[in-house]
């Protein structure tokens, strides 16, 4: 939810300052390369929770052959245990920014 809000805010600001979707994506890639690299690797479970690094690594090696135990992770500070549920998926921020840019551009054109 937070991620989607960030994407939508980026698209709205880009529209406000006159940037195209291509320009917005170029800025994301060139000005935030570390974020871009992390997001290309991040996975989220069906409940929208970010899959921790250890589970992500095992998933990339073994796919959905992970047992419940393999998908269980304990938060180091709180001790709360989480079980990450399939399917896991990644997100493409550039694709999402393009969609938001198109959607908001259309909405704003209708109000002119």
Image (spheres, helix red, strand yellow):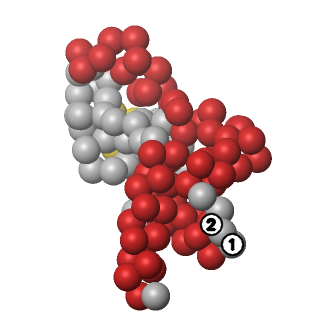
101, above or below 84, in the image: below
Q: Which residue is mark 2?
A: 14
Seen as rendered, the residue at the extreme bottom is 112
Tell me whether circle 2 and circle 1 mark residues in contact (CB < 8 Å).
yes
**Can the viewer see residue 95 in this picture?**
yes
What's the mark number on residue 17?
Answer: 1
At a point 63% along the width and 54% down the height, the residue shown is: 24
77, above or below 3, in the image: above
At a point 24% along the width and 34% down the height, the residue shown is: 87
Quadrant of the snapshot with the N terminus? bottom left
Residue 96 in the image: state x and y as whole percent. 44, 51
Residue 60 in the image: state x and y as whole percent. 40, 18
At a point 24% along the width and 20% down the height, the residue shown is: 64
- In the displayed structure image, the side of residue 88 where residue 21 appears, left or right: right
For the residue labelled by badge 1, is the local secondary structure a helix, a strand or a loop?
loop
25, above or below 57, in the image: below
Q: Residues within 10 Å of mark 2 (few under 14, many from 20)?
A: some
- In the displayed structure image, the side of residue 49 where residue 57 appears, left or right: right
- In the displayed structure image, the side of residue 94 where residue 48 appears, left or right: left
Residue 8 in the image: state x and y as whole percent. 49, 66
The image quadrant of residue 95 is top left
């Amino acid at each position: 939810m937070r991620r989607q809000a960030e994407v939508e805010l980026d698209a709205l600001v880009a529209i406000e300052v006159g940037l195209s979707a291509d320009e917005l994506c170029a800025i994301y890639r060139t000005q935030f390369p570390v974020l871009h690299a992390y997001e290309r690797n991040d996975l989220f479970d069906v409940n929208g929770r970010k899959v921790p690094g250890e589970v992500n690594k095992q998933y990339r090696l073994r796919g959905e052959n992970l047992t419940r135990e393999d998908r269980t992770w304990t938060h180091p500070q709180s001790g709360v245990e989480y079980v990450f549920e399939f399917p896991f998926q990644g997100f493409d921020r550039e694709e999402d920014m393009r969609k938001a840019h198109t959607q908001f551009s259309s909405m704003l054109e209708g109000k002119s």
